[in-house]
Image (spheres, grey):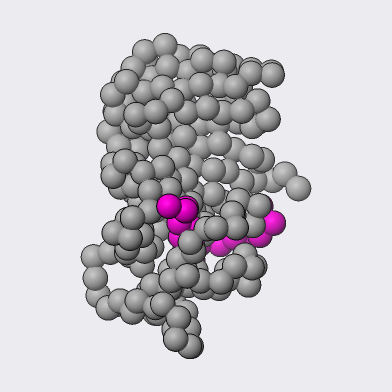
Amino acid sequence: MDRCVIVGGAPIGDYARARAALRPRDYVIYCDSGLRHASGLGVPADLVVGDFDSHPRPAGDGDVIVLPREKDDTDTVYGAKTALARGFRDFLLLGAVGGRLDHTLANVGILLMLDGAGCHAAAADDFSTLEIVSRQEAAVPPDCPYFSLLAVDGPAEGVTIRGAKYPLEGARIDASYQYGVSNEPLPGCTARITVARGRLLLVRVARDADAP
């Protein structure tokens, strides 16, 4: 099955970067105010979900799920759950990071939920790509200037980083001491990351926020 792209309402400033992450066969879900990114992304909706408290409901007869405004799931969470129920196992979240911090942290929770369901999921913003490291080895290519490993789901143990400026071997990272920030692949090397127990958020930084 093809990949599902879920578009939320967080700011997207670099549409060229977002469009470069898209694939021709992606199934695209716009979540409420994520619809404001449709023109910049240049891809139509396969499905729209939302309570439409922050964007008008789209006109026409397309696939639209109207949600109540008082509910436990955010529109983006509901979109992810719907895609899971429809059989998708590979996900990209756009417009999910940045803007309101509470929504950003909640959307990191979506990455954890999808990882727990055995899926691959990533979220991309103007500067970085986020994914969960758990069962499988993760790689950071040599053209990635920086990467960070953050504890977002309790402590992670047996953390090993090889091929990086700051290596680790069987280490522990927990949320009270986030010392896995701003590592770098060694020149010409792919950094490789494994976690024996627990999960970490891997942030591959493509460029600094103040870079042109």
> Please, is residue 152 above or below residue 90 in the view?
above
Task: Give the percent coordinates (x, y) of residue 177.
Answer: 38, 27
Residue at the image position 45 percent from the left and 14 percent from the top: 168
- Residue placed at 40% from the left, 32% from the top? 133
Looking at the image, the residue that sits furthest to the front is 1
Q: Which is more toward the observer, 65 or 155?
A: 65
Place of residue 211 in the rendered image (x, y in percent of width and height, measured from the top left): 72, 44
- Residue projecting furthest to the top: 169
| Image height of 96 relative to 44, above or below | above
Residue at x-position 36% and y-position 64%: 79
Residue 173, visible in the rendered structure: no
Residue 190 spot, x, y in % from top left: 60, 22
Judging depth in this view, the residue of 166 and 198 nearest the camera is 198
What residue lies at 68% left-to-right and 30% top-to-bottom? 143
**Is 139 in the magenta?**
no
Query: Can you give x and y, in whole percent of width and height, for residue 88 in the image?
Result: 38, 53
Asked whether residue 189 is in view, the answer is: yes
Quadrant hosting residue 146: top right
The span shown in magenta is 1-17
- 82 sits left or right of 133 in the view: left
- How many discs mark residues in the rendered view? 0
